[in-house]
Image: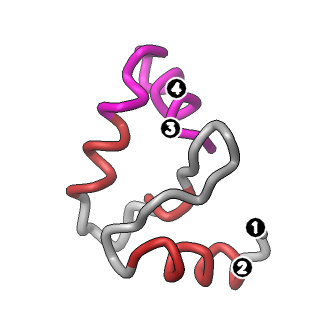
Amino acid sequence: MTYKQVAIKAGNPNAARAVGAIMRTNYDPTVPCHRVIHTSGVIGNYNRGGPSRKREILMSEGAL
């Protein structure tokens, strides 16, 4: 899902940046924040290892 799609599901389509802020500060391993990407398809950053780790996890899950 994209940050915007998550915001829409949460009930506020204008809150994509807020979703990003929440994901940036989330360290709960049960929340799959590595699965959220930019609308443009860019992977984006990941607070538990950077974009390369995020790409690695997505590839291991078959999402890339």
Amino acid type of the residue that numbered disc 3 sits on in the rendered structure: Tyr
**Rendered residue at 48%/15% (across/down):** 13
Mark closer to the chain start, 1 or 4: 4
**Rendered residue at 52%/26% (across/down):** 9
Disc 4 from disc 3: Cα separation: 10 Å
Q: Secondary structure at mark 4?
A: helix
The image shows residue 32, relative to residue 16, as above or below, that is: below
User: In the rendering, which numbered label is found on residue 3?
Assistant: 3
Q: Is residue 50 left or right of residue 52?
A: left
10 Å crowding of disc 3: few (<14), some (14-19), many (20+): many
For mark 1, what is the residue?
Answer: 63
Amino acid type of the residue that numbered disc 4 sits on in the rendered structure: Lys
Foreground: disc 2 or disc 4: 2
Q: Is residue 6 left or right of residue 61?
A: left
Magenta residues span 1-18
Quarter-of-image position of residue 60: bottom right
Foreground: disc 1 or disc 4: 1
For mark 4, what is the residue?
Answer: 9
Amino acid type of the residue that numbered disc 2 sits on in the rendered structure: Met
For mark 2, what is the residue?
Answer: 59
Residue 30 placement (x, y as % from top left): 37, 68
Q: Secondary structure at mark 3?
A: helix
Mark closer to the chain start, 1 or 3: 3
The image shows residue 37, relative to residue 11, as above or below, that is: below
Disc 2 from disc 4: Cα separation: 25 Å
| Label pair 1/3, CB-CB below 8 angstroms | no
Q: Which one is in front, 53 or 1?
A: 53
| Label pair 4/3, CB-CB below 8 angstroms | no
Disc 1 from disc 4: Cα separation: 20 Å
